[in-house]
Image (spheres, rainbow, N blue to C red):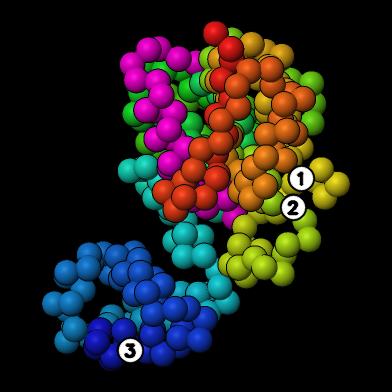
């Protein structure tokens, strides 16, 4: 079989599960990972025969994609803010919106030396991206998941970034004294919306990373604000899917005495909160 035929086979097998644009992007992920070819090269290789070992890998990947397994888990890799990170099912796949949260912190704090804590760090994506951009900052990450922390540490080591990760549970009394900034993309999806979620998210990503407590969806967002308030941090940056931002701001007012600003993502949706201590 040549590569042109393999590409047709790939599209045909997955056409019911994915839109055309998604398929193109998935095909290019696979061709990069399996053959080591970028986009342009892939198109010059149409007549090349597919090696038997590659063909077996392609068939395995097509089968896994057919079951909606995220391509990032299949190849164990995700890209975030210019970094290639190892990922596995113990960590959320870093999202492009979270890159915007990182960009916001970097824009607000140019050069001054800061101590920053990423709360609910998962793969370590936020902490590592911040450290990569601001080598003079002291950046650390915490998470309740031991498995996620192992992945975050592996990423720090592979990227040679000096970020320490440790275990902490937001449900406990925590002391984050000494940090200037807390940043967090905590679990915030209310249970009960599972029917509207993509199979690839619901069936493959860790529920510990996705879902907030049923009876109190803003719980983790409020906990980060509360701990930041108690420990005297100057800023807290939060990601959420604040469809009801006014309710959320009201909820956070019980936890944070300073200002609370709702920020929008590039698609114009209210998605981030910047909590700033009164000067
Ligand atoms: C939405 S994920 C964010 C991961 C990563 N920061 C990112 O942006 O891709 C939320 C993270 O919070 C962690 N988490 C869940 N419950 C927690 C708790 N009680 N205390 C601390 N971290 C918790 C999860 O393990 C997960 O890694």
Query: What crowding class fits label 3: few (fewer than 14 Cα within 10 Å), some (14-19), or many (20 or more)?
Result: few
Image height of 241 relative to 61, above or below = above
Name the residue beneath numbered marker 3.
8
Q: Which percent across, then down, holds residue 27?
A: 35, 74
Name the residue beneath numbered marker 1.
217
The mark tally for this picture is: 3
Q: Identify the residue at horizontal 62%, vertical 57% (top origin).
A: 205
The numbered mark, 1 or 3, whose residue comes first in the sequence reads 3
Query: What crowding class fits label 1: few (fewer than 14 Cα within 10 Å), some (14-19), or many (20 or more)?
Result: some
Q: Which percent across, then down, holds residue 134?
A: 35, 23
Query: What crowding class fits label 2: few (fewer than 14 Cα within 10 Å), some (14-19), or many (20 or more)?
Result: some
- The answer to if 164 sits in the magenta stretch is no
Q: Identify the residue at horizontal 17%, vertical 87% (top origin).
A: 47
What's the magenta region?
89-115
Q: Do the residues labelled 1 and 2 touch (CB within 8 Å)?
A: yes
Name the residue beneath numbered marker 2.
190
Q: Identify the residue at horizontal 60%, vertical 27% (top origin).
A: 260
């Amino acid at each position: 079989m040549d590569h042109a035929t393999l590409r047709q086979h790939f599209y045909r097998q997955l056409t019911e599960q994915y839109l055309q644009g998604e398929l193109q992007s998935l095909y290019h992920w696979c061709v990069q990972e399996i053959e080591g070819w970028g986009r342009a090269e892939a198109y010059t290789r149409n007549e090349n025969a597919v090696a038997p070992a590659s063909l077996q890998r392609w068939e395995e990947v097509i089968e896994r994609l057919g079951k909606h397994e995220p391509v990032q888990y299949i190849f164990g890799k995700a890209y975030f803010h210019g970094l290639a990170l190892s990922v596995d099912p113990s960590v959320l796949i870093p999202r492009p919106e979270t890159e915007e949260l990182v960009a916001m912190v970097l824009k607000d704090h140019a050069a001054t030396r800061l101590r920053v804590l990423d709360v609910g760090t998962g793969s370590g994506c936020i902490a590592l991206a911040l450290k990569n951009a601001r080598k003079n900052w002291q950046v650390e990450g915490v998470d309740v998941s031991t498995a996620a922390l192992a992945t975050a540490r592996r990423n720090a080591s592979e990227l040679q970034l000096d970020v320490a990760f440790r275990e902490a549970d937001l449900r406990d009394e925590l002391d984050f004294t000494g940090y200037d900034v807390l940043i967090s993309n905590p679990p915030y999806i209310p249970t009960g919306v599972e029917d509207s979620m993509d199979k690839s998210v619901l069936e493959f990503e860790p529920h510990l990373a996705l879902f907030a407590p049923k009876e109190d969806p803003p719980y983790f967002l409020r906990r980060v604000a509360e701990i930041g308030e108690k420990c005297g941090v100057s800023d807290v940056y939060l990601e959420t899917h604040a469809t009801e931002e006014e309710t959320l701001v009201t909820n956070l007012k019980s936890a944070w005495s300073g200002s609370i600003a709702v920020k929008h993502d590039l698609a114009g949706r209210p998605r981030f909160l910047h909590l700033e201590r009164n000067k």
